[in-house]
Image (cartoon, rainbow, N blue to C red):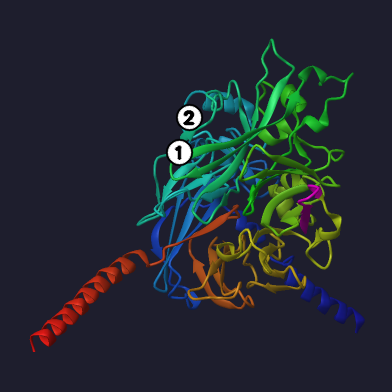
Amino acid sequence: MDVVLNLFLLLIAISAFGFADPNYKNIFRQTTKEAQNEVLTDITGHIPRWLSGDFVRQNCASYGEIDGNLSGSIPHMFDCISMVGRYKFDNGKVEYSNKFFDSRNTRIWKHYGMNISRSKVNWPTVMADIDTSAFIKDIRTTFNETLFFIPSINFWKTGSHEQILAVTESFNSPTALKTSPDLEIVGMQFRRFKDEGFPPSFRNPLQHPIVNTPAHEQTDSDGTVWSSSLEIEKFNSTKLDDLEMAMVVYSIKGNNRTLATRYVLGKYNLSRCSSLEQADLDAMPGYNHFIQTTSKHILVPQTSYRFDYCLDYKNRGKIVPFFRGSYAWHPSVNSSILVFEREDMAKVHHVYLPYAKFFTHDINAYEDDTHMYLDVLSYKNSDLYLEVTKLKSMLNDLQWSASIIRIAIDKQSWLYDATKSGPLTETEQIGKAEFPTINYGRHHQRNYTFTYYTANALYRGAKIAKLNVVTKQTIFWTPPFGYYPQEPIFVQSEGGSDEDDGIVLCSGPISNPSGTSFLAILNAKDLSQIALIKNPNAAPFGLHNRFYSRKKTSASSRALSVLSVIFLSFCIYLALTQTLLCYLL
């Protein structure tokens, strides 16, 4: 009897956590098909008619071969062959489009018949090992003219709705996309902003290379976008010391990118990078994946994953993955936050934290009269980049865990306040959590209650979570077996007044042999399922999503304004006529 009971409980656990999915590998199988405005009709439930806009997502189109020893694969998801996908919602209907980026790695892959076993990983990468012999042969000859940076991480919106930007972590990477009426890639050249206030050397990689521009920007209510970049003065054969490092903070509005401040982090000395003398670890700037803002401040985190100038110097002239060749985890160096005052960006507070952490994604930031609060997803080291996001780790279900924490800063002393900081969940470690979001439209830079994220993100048993950061209670939406949701996106409902009046959109691959995908629409209050949309197109695990509203207010408002003027004119005419008649009588 005990054996039967234990077997029954084991089956329940396996089913709940997804370990029994025999088709799990299928979610990584490549797609070679582009789609254009395909109407999706396999829908369980209904699509809210008020939902109008574009849900855009970064897709990994190919990881290569996923069977055997993975020798013919792209071993890291950061370097996959990338596509952009778009779900277009209008009047209760949905269409799907996707397209490859015309990037260097995509052209090489297509040149070899979309076969990674033939092409190898034959392009600049951030994590994956590079086949150097093929790299030299192909990159420097046939494919030198194509897009170098692959804008495969996130999306920004810097102007009208008609154009958004696909970005990676490069100052010069934005690629323009036009989302209406069709998903178009508007040229594969870098989006050239009109730069104001930057020194002439800033865009010259031979003098001042930019090594870290966070993929996650912040946008003010007036549409102003904020970001930052790490600027490194490049060494040469005659100058190895007194080299400057600076954090550059800037705003973007429309086509204008304007320098707000340039904060010198310090100097570095390559002559200290020897076995006889320890390099100055404190002088190594920390990696940051996001920038955050409050109503009065700009916050730039500095994690303990450091730009290791000694490692970078050692790898000079070598063909190595960017992160592995230039960054290193230094647990002896505590993380910190650079806080810039909006009224005077020259005023900077460097707030040191009492621990070494790796931060990926921000949740929110706000402040009151005495404190500033930054809520983030936190990790004990940089393994999220180095190990967790490897194809092999995802296939073998590597164990890892995250924390959702609050960092409180006393605005009088500009010190970390431990009494108001700490985990926002009942237990500090909450398992494989990633991709947090909130109701940004209403609560960005304000106190808030709810965040949504993906539990077991990128792994078996993925599901959507809603966390109440006040009560620390969490509820979940568990998808059908074989469905693997990625980043959730909150969309405010029409006329909604509560923080969680709206829906949550999430999409991802399905592990069936035909390699299809899905999009789910959830009620943001209780995560009940409103609609489940099956997509015949494959969409392997990728990174980030965004929703851009296409509210029907502009044209209708203009029409209403015209009618109002006509009606008002008519009323005035009647009033004048009646007055004149009364006068005559």
Q: What SS does tag 2 mark?
A: loop
Position above or below: 269 against 570: above
Crowding at mark 1 (Cα within 10 Å: few <14, some 14-19, many 20+): some
Three-letter code for the amino acid on which mark 2 is drawn: Phe
Q: Is residue 78 magenta?
A: no
**Magenta stretch mostly in which secondary structure?**
strand
In the image, the segment drawn in magenta is 403-415
Residue lying farthest to the left in this orientation: 584
Mark 2, mark 1: which one is toward the viewer? Answer: 1
Res 336 seen here: yes
Three-letter code for the amino acid on which mark 1 is drawn: Arg
**x and y percent of residue 513 in the render?**
57, 62
Residue lying farthest to the right in this orientation: 2
Q: What SS does tag 1 mark?
A: loop
Position above or below: 174 against 317: below
At x 69%, y 10%, the residue is 238
Determine the image quadrant of residue 341.
top right
- Precedes in sequence: disc 2 or disc 1: 2
Position above or below: 317 against 412: above
At x 43%, y 75%, the residue is 49
CA separation in Å, label 2 and label 1: 20 Å
Crowding at mark 2 (Cα within 10 Å: few <14, some 14-19, many 20+): some
The residue beneath circle 2 is 143
Of 246 and 147, nearer the camera is 246
Q: Where does the C terminus fall, quadrant-wise?
A: bottom left
**x and y percent of residue 388 in the render?**
74, 50
The residue beneath circle 1 is 191
Residue lying farthest to the bottom in this orientation: 585
Q: Is residue 406 magenta?
A: yes
Res 73 seen here: no
Q: Is residue 238 left or right of residue 166?
A: right
